[in-house]
Structure formats: C-alpha cells, structure tokens
Amino acid sequence: MGLHALYGHESLLHRLEGTIASGRFPQTVLLVGPAGVGKQRLALHIAESLFCHDEGEAPRGECRASRQVRQLSHPDLHWFIPIVPPAKRSGDPEKQIQDTEEALAEALAERRKNPIYRSPDGRATHSVASARLLQRKVRLTPFQARRKVVILGDADRLVLHEEAAGEAANALLKVLEEPPEDTTLILTSSVPEALLPTIRSRMVSVRVGPLRDEQVQNLLSTETGMSPGEARRVSQLAGGSVTRALGVADAGDDGAQAAKRFLDAIRRGPEAWAGEALLQQAWGARGGFSAMLDALTIRLRSKLRRSAEQGGADTRNYLDAIRLVEAHRDRAMRNVNPQLALAVLASEVAEVL
C-alpha cells in the first residue's frame, strides 16, 4: 500500500495545482487545520503534483513520479513524522542521527502498510537528531527530480530546546526560514501557535478544514473495512476528524463508563471530581485517558443534539463544554499528566454546565 485517495480536500488541491502550474506555488507552506482531517495526506498529494509538473511528461496519476509518490518511494520525497526517541540514547550525535533515521524508516514502513493511523504517541517528537537528519536531506542534490520535497508532519512537535542543541536548532531554523532553491518545504500542524513565530512568519499558511460526516464515513468504509452502520455512527460524532472517528470507535464501554462517571462527579461537586481525577493513571495509560475524552465528547454531543432538538436553554453550555474537552484532547497527545489535566478540565467544565 501507499498513498491513498484524497477525501474532502479535492477542491483545495485543485486550487493549489493551479498555483503549481503557474509557477507561483510557495517554497514554504504550512498546512493548518484540526487534527485528523488529512493534512499530511494532502501534503503528499501536493508533492505528487509538484513532481509531475516538473516532469511535464504525463498528467498527475500517470507519470513515473506519480507512481513513485503513491508508493511512497520517490527518492526526492522526504517525509518526517514525530517518533518516540529510542529508549537508550547514545551520547554520539552521529549515532543518534543513525538511530533516528532507522526509527523513522520503520514508522514510515508502517504507514505504507496502513495509511490510516492514530495521533502520534504523547512522547513522540521531532528531536534534535531528527532536525539534524532533516538538514542533511535538505543539503542533498535532487536524485531524480528538479527539486526535493520535504514534509514535516505535526511540525508543532519540533523540539529545539534540548541541551547542547543550539547549533542544530539555529541551523534548522535557517533551513525552515530560507530553504535551498531546489527544496520545497511543506509543514503541517493542528497547533500552529506552538511553532516559533519566526517559522510561522516565513511560511504561507493554507487552511485545511474539517471533513463532512459523509466524507469521514466514506473513508472509514473504504479504507478500514468498518461496516457502513458503524462508520455512519462514529462519523456523526467525529467532528470532521478521521483520528477522532477512530477514537470514537476505540472508546468502547470502558471509555463510555469513565465519561459517565466523570460527568456525574462534576455534578456532585469538586470533592467528587477531584477523586475521579485521582483515579486516572498518572502516566502509564494516556491511551485510556484519550479514549475517555473521546467518549466524553460523544456524550456531550449527544446531549447537545437532544437539547437543540428540544429548544433547550443549555445548548450553548454544551457547546462550550465540548470545546473545552476537545482542547484537552489535543493536549492529551502530548506529554501531560492525565491526573492534573483531568482536574483542570473538571473545574472548567463545571463552570459552563
């Protein structure tokens, strides 16, 4: 397997292809939008269009470069994704780069097998070793095409503050701000404010919106083998995000029960919700924490729909509560303490419900 079809962003890709054909496509682009809406898949399709336009031999989908990109094997396409640093880190920077390259290759091989993937682990980052590896890739002469295309997925996970990393950080910032002429950089982020202002200011931002429910449903039915009924159910609760839809499907009874207990505890007051927060495992089960938050969103969306149908006065309250949960859901994928996060969420939700 490799690059799959695009869902929901065809018109955006068509507009971007117009800028490619006119020679006006920016050298550095930041794709911004909610998590799980297909920003990295869109970036790969953009790379395909860039390479095919440069070859000028056949339409996209038919040229050699297109076939290579769709197999994720084009020699001038470099895709960086956040990875969990090796358990045993070498003190040798060269060995760190080698270990990172191997770990990245394994992660991308998994994505070739299954292009439908969850959000990165909370510990996953673009480390200093990743930054140094990216610098090397950027310095390479294109092997086949006229340009290199570098995709930095979840760019907000870029770590530039590690000890003794000043030189690497400055060099990478220079690459991101002023890439070589033969390099196109495409970054993606659902939390653009986490990027350094100097990076954001040099990039052309392109907004990538959420998918429609039927687009999420179609993707799930086509690419995951999910039954049409289940795909319809989870897509209606996913808020236009495939990642969220997968979380809804994974939440199951345990997540639903935890969400119910959490809401019940909020209604009983601070002593109850503080106790519920302490029951959450501190660091060992962020997956369970995320599943509970997904189930909580489902429960609140259900209450929102019921309130809207009945003309209830608490519709706005449920909307505010959902926004709070979703904000914490985004943070949950980072290295946060679930107990503390749940306590903060409880206090915030208690104020709006």
Image: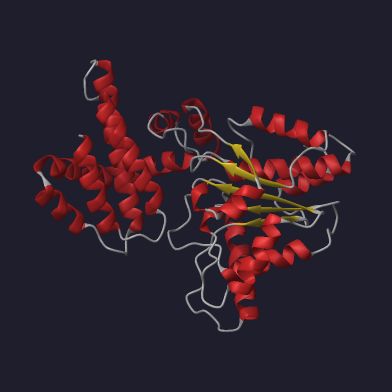
What is the quadrant of residue 51 in the picture? top right
Q: Nearer the viewer, residue 266 or 293?
A: 266
Residue at x-position 48% and y-position 55%: 120
- The image shows residue 49 at horizontal and vertical percentages of 76, 40
- The image shows residue 267 at horizontal and vertical percentages of 13, 39
In the rendered view, tell whether residue 162 sits above or below residue 334: below
Residue 16 visible somewhere in the drawing: yes
- The image shows residue 289 at horizontal and vertical percentages of 31, 53
Render colour scheme: secondary structure
Asked whether, in this view, residue 180 is left or right of residue 121, the answer is right
Residue 1 visible somewhere in the drawing: no
What is the quadrant of residue 259 in the picture? top left
Residue at x-position 74% and y-position 61%: 138
Residue at x-position 10% and y-position 45%: 269
In the rendered view, tell whether residue 286 sits above or below residue 67: below
Quarter in which the C terminus is drawn: top left
Residue at x-position 9% and y-position 51%: 271
